[in-house]
Image: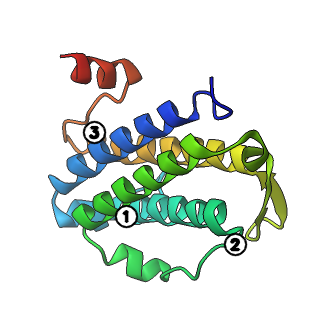
Amino acid sequence: MSAAGDLPELLRYNTWANTRVCETCAEASPELLTAPAPGTIGTVLATVAHLTRMEEAYCSLLQKDSVAPMEPREAFESRDMAALGRRLAELGTTFRAWVERATAEELARQLPITWLDFEVSAREALLQVLSHSAQHRSQVLSVLGAQGIEVPDLDYVLLLQQERG
């Protein structure tokens, strides 16, 4: 097994799950996506935008040891769900490519989390991406489901079933 262990597979799942959530959101009305949604970052759209911004920040950290200048939050929130979904898919590809070639030393490398004022290893940063995105996907699906929208089941085995169909 590579130094990355199961991280490539977990990142593959993360991309699949993000895609399914963005596809579900794209079917919802713009009013629902921008309405106040208690239990989220504020709205469904703001939550998916936040998820995307954070994946982008961690991806930048892995590649450059610093966070590249980011678009303001409002710019992310002005994107439509399809654009956020495309960006999350791009980030997923980048994360997987990085982790598949990462050595044990690269995964242990300390990264500055400037917004929290401490460092984490690259491996810990990837685990943060995975857990953070899962948290916000569940918030989004909870809100959409409560509004009567059919939401997808994101079990890992369903990804496998889809592929093995």
- Residue occupied by mark 2: 66
Q: Nearer the viewer, mark 2 or mark 1?
A: 2
Q: Say if mark 2 contacts mark 1, CB within 8 Å.
A: no
Q: Amino acid at mark 3?
A: Gly
Residue at 43% in and 50% down: 92
Image quadrant for the N terminus?
top right
The residue that mark 1 highlights is 36
Residue type (three-letter) at the residue carrying disc 2: Ser
User: Residue 83: x, y in percent?
Assistant: 27, 67
Residue furthest toward the right? 118
Pick whichever, 2 or 5, lies toward us. 2
Left or right: residue 56 compared with residue 128: left
Q: Quadrant of residue 58?
A: bottom right
Residue 70 coordinates in the image, percent (x, y): 53, 79
Can you tell which mark lies on residue 145? 3
Residue type of the residue flagged with mark 1: Pro
Which numbered circle lies on residue 134?
none
Q: Position of residue 121 (x, y in %)?
A: 78, 49
